[in-house]
Amino acid sequence: MSQVCEVSKDIIKMTLPTPFLVGPVNSYLIKGNALTLVDVGPKTPEALAALKLYLKEQRLQLKDIEVVILTHHHPDHIGLLEEFIPHAKVYAHRKVKPWLNSDTNFLQKTRGFLNGLYRKHGVSEAIISEIERNNKKLLSYSAKGTVDKVLEEGDKLSFLDGWSVIETPGHAQSHISLYREDGLLISGDHLIKHISSNAIIEAPYEDGEERPRTLLQYRQSMEKCMHIDIAYSGHGEAVTDPKTLIKTRLAEQDKKAKQFKSMMGSDPISCFELCKKKYAHIIEKQAALTFSETLGHLDLLEERKEVERVEGDGVLKYRVI
């Protein structure tokens, strides 16, 4: 059965299989002044075959795509990019560049920073090794390439009438969403109807920068999108009432922050200890995501001056104020 859905007369949603827990990913074909594809799916034979089939239903081939826009750098969104080089121009946020370039220095610094961060927050060496194995596997579904045109907040897309860029960091530092002046948003993983996007912890991209507080960023990015009328997501169905969904997501985060705080007890506790308390049933399978979730909510509690950091024995801990 076809997984092609006509969003409007000029936007086609194509749903591609992925090997990831998140399930299928959506790619959007926009028929503008340039034939544009937003996100391309993971680097797998199954995703490529599906994409070719869906384009064929539109009487198109891979070579007909003139522009590829990447909402962010995660492999399920960029993996098939090499299939469109060199005939298509690639548009993305500047922070997609080092991932596509496979910048060795950047990747080594990122790995070193995150491993140091995990150790500082009490993560065991066994879990760190497992995270590294999973990250290496994840990158095997990604792509190599270049960004021909960097997109930033407010940029107009000359080849797509009425479209502009909204920077929406949080789920990824490289995340952008595409806004059409009639209130439609192609939101990537920024807004998803059936699941809450994880605000994944990342290393800083520039020397001297602090670690981004990704959950705080994500909340700000959601609040920027309160005016949206409908959002077409990277996964699942369209969000037909974005304002209500955003309010729900913010309330869920507030509730979860209270849950984390109530689990902390009276003695200082590390992020990893708290993570194990909250996610004991899934921490070994989803260590990086559960750690990101825990640290993000500690950032939120710290921002609200409800907890404070305490240094001791080389491990950073938190205590309720």
Image (cartoon, grey):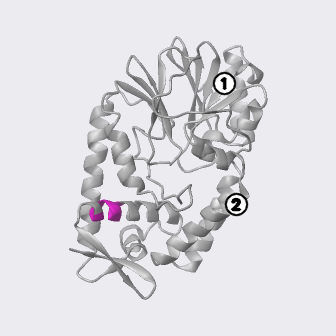
User: Count of labels shown?
Assistant: 2
Q: Which residue is mark 2?
A: 105
Task: Give the answer, above or below, for where 43 lies relative to 64.
Answer: below
Whether residue 301 appears in magenta in the rendering, the answer is: yes
Which residue ends up furthest to the bottom in the rendered image?
313
Question: What segment carries the magenta color?
Answer: 297-302
Give the quarter of the figure containing the C terminus: bottom left
Q: Position of residue 253 (x, y in %)?
A: 30, 53
Q: Position of residue 60 (x, y in %)?
A: 72, 16
Q: Is residue 1 visible?
A: no
Give the quarter of the figure containing the N terminus: top right
Q: Which residue is mark 1?
A: 67
* Residue type for callout 2: Asn
Q: Position of residue 231 (x, y in %)?
A: 41, 29
Quarter of the view holding residue 226: top left
Q: Nearer the viewer, residue 18 or 217?
A: 217
